[in-house]
Amino acid sequence: MASANSSSSSSVFDVAVIGGGLVGSAIAYGLRGSVESVAVLDEGDVALRASRGNFGLVWLQSKGYGMGAYSHWTLRSTRLWPQLAARLLDETGIDVALEQKGGLTPLMGDHEIEARLAWVERLMAQPGVEPYEWKLLDHHQAAALVPGLGADVTGAIWTPHDGIVNPLKLLRALHAAFARGGVSYLPNHGVEKIEHSAGMFHLRTAARCIHARKIVLASGLHNGALGAQVGIDLPMAPQRGQIIVLERTRRLLDTPMVTLRQNDEGSWLVGDSQEDAGYADHVTTLPVLATLADRAVRTLPALGDVRAVRAWSALRVRAKDGFPVYEQSARHPGAFIATCHSGVTLAAIHAFTLAPMIAAGALAPALDGFSTRRFHVQSA
Amino acid sequence: MFSRLEPPAARTVRITVDGASIACGEGDSVAAALLAAGIDACRDTAVSGTARGPFCMMGVCYDCLVGIDGQPNQQACMTRVREGMVVNRQLGAREVKA
Ligand SMILES: Cc1cc2nc3c(=O)[nH]c(=O)nc-3n(C[C@H](O)[C@H](O)[C@H](O)COP(=O)(O)OP(=O)(O)OC[C@H]3O[C@@H](n4cnc5c(N)ncnc54)[C@H](O)[C@@H]3O)c2cc1C
Ligand code: FES
């Protein structure tokens, strides 16, 4: 990772991004070139960091139920992803192992199939959803994609847009690009206070004060508290996810599933639960892990003798309704906020579409639906 | 080649490593037995195929993986030798038969 550039300590940055997780890093990456100087302020190693504990899906199906625009935004990101992966490889030599060969949501029994089918049809019928190819596969069709598919999997929803990356390599590649591309990465710069005067933002950290003309709040679960300092009222609701990692084996599974994938280096990830557990990301729980493991073995019985090597839990960064939030502060123009629940999937559109809007100083009207105004509709 | 700091245990146990019979001290870990027999590359990495051998000897580096009695990916440093044990050097990642 790039270290703090001491010569910049007294200067003014064009844009300071608060948070060096996947959201802040993708935005900072996309800002290079369009603005002179970018800083990324990050905490130390104590932070809650979804970007280091996620499942690594680049995933479209299931996104946008209740907000059609989110489906469309996600679709656009999945289309931009090959370009992001290619550019990162070219600029940093790091292959983030993007594979977009389609993905499956395995379903067990008629009840799950009917419920999921009806759900997907409602999702696709919403205004704002750009139609895309998807299919309900029967067991045999799914088994053609998944060698050794368990008999319990009686169907699966498939789309060609879904895929995977190695999320740790993605974060590393973005940070490696900072080192080459003039982004100052400042670890141990937790922002405590944001002040705004005379068109300039002053970010107070324990060590010093950073000045910038524009700021982007991308501090994950801290965005609620930091947003309040720039007049954005963002209700957050962390959601815990647990993941089990199985030992590496030769590659068997090429088509990822929403709860089971094999990564580029052969490790298996079994995931990932959705629990309301407040900010407790330091525990894993046996009932949840047992349920995940049981479903994985029913999906692919050969995994029965592949050993687990570790398990962890991490907190998803979520606004109350689960959809992304992008907004420029009305009270402090120049302060932008970005929060989302799928920072891997959306990394490409954050870099190539959102970042240029921030550089230009205005979010496109198409993003209006992602503002926090949706939480503050007057109640009757 | 490694040599023992202390004289070997009084009793000897025989194991088979890639078909060759090796005499080990009772109580040796498989990793120690391999090193004492001059076998320092017990596996190839799953990703690049680079040769690796026991490094930490205490269960954390996973560089000592071997097959033991038909079970792949066993940590040689965390397993004690047993009379008749069959050890195989592990070449590349283990396979899952689907
Ligand atoms: C179990 C699990 C599975 C997931 N699976 C997927 C998936 O398959 N696909 C997908 O697209 N997404 C997935 N996600 C979601 C994805 O990981 C998150 O959307 C994404 O990582 C959020 O990135 P972030 O940068 O907003 O947050 P974080 O990774 O939390 O980063 C926030 C950063 O801000 C810093 N920070 C916080 N406060 C301050 C401050 N005051 N000053 C300076 N810096 C600060 C922190 O140090 C941290 O580095 C998953 C999440 C979890 C938990
Ligand atoms: S030598 Fe390190 S785990 Fe065995």
Image (cartoon, coloured by chain):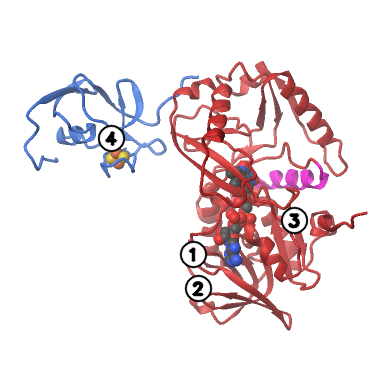
Chain colours: A red, B blue
- Closest to the camera, between mark 3 and mark 1, is 3
Mark 2, secondary structure of its residue: loop
Alpha carbons under labels 3 and 2: distance apart: 31 Å
- Give the camera-side residue of A120 and A191: A191
Chain under disc 2: A
Chain under disc 4: B
- Is residue A225 left or right of A372 when viewed as pictured? left
Q: Amino acid at mark 3?
A: Val
The residue beneath circle 3 is A325
Q: Is mark 1 within 8 Å of ligand 1?
A: no
- In the image, residue A168 sits, relative to residue A39, either above or below, namely above
- Are discs 2 and 1 less than 8 Å apart at CB? yes
The residue beneath circle 4 is B78
Chain under disc 3: A
- Closest to the camera, between mark 4 and mark 1, is 4
Alpha carbons under labels 3 and 1: distance apart: 28 Å
**Label 3 vs 2, first from the N-terminus:** 2
Chain under disc 1: A
Of all residues, the one furthest to the right in this rendering is A380
Mark 4: few/some/many CA within 10 Å (<14, 14-19, 20+): some
Residue under the point 54% across and 39% down: A243
Mark 3: few/some/many CA within 10 Å (<14, 14-19, 20+): many
- Closest to the camera, between mark 2 and mark 4, is 4
The residue beneath circle 2 is A5
- Checking the image for residue A2, the label placed there is 1
Can residue A70 be found in the magenta stretch? yes
Q: Which residues are magenta?
A: A66-82
